[in-house]
Image: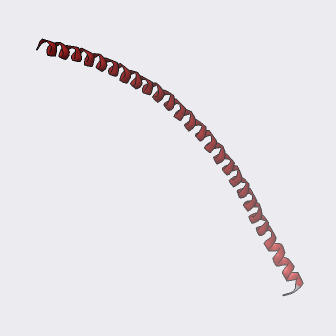
Amino acid sequence: MSDTQLLYVALAAAPTMLAVLVGILINNSRLNDTNTRIAELRIHMDTRFTDVERRFDDRFDGVDRRFDEMRDLWRSELHRVEEVLDARLKHLEDRG
């Protein structure tokens, strides 16, 4: 093959290689852009989930406080009933 033929083959292949190279570069830049968007979406979703988790925690803290108050109320009422029963038992024992 002569030098001229090699030159023609190289010149014929050059536009194809250039088109493929440009396509690769464009695709790579779009992938980087997509990765950036995915990272932004992940940050946004993490923020939203953290906000929802905080709201649930706030609500459940209120429920926990109510349960604690009810437990304390029941304990005080049960203690009062126990004192009444003890007094009645003592009264019955004293009579008998």
Image quadrant in which the N terminus is located: bottom right
Name the residue at 83% across, 76% down.
Answer: 10
In the image, residue 83 lies at what x, y percent? 27, 16
Name the residue at 70% across, 57% down.
Answer: 27
Image quadrant in which the C terminus is located: top left
Q: Nearer the viewer, residue 67 or 43?
A: 67
Residue 32, compared with residue 11, is above or below; it is above
Q: Nearer the viewer, residue 30 or 96?
A: 96
In the image, residue 30 lies at what x, y percent? 70, 53
Identify the coloring. secondary structure
Left or right of residue 51: residue 16: right
Name the residue at 33% across, 22% down.
Answer: 75
Residue 29, compared with residue 82, is above or below; it is below
Labels in figure, total: 0
Left or right of residue 30: residue 74: left
In the image, residue 69 lies at what x, y percent? 40, 21
Image quadrant in which you'd find residue 65: top left
In the image, residue 89 lies at what x, y percent? 18, 17
Left or right of residue 80: residue 39: right
Name the residue at 43% across, 26% down.
Answer: 63
Residue 43, compared with residue 61, is above or below; it is below
Image quadrant in which you'd find residue 81: top left
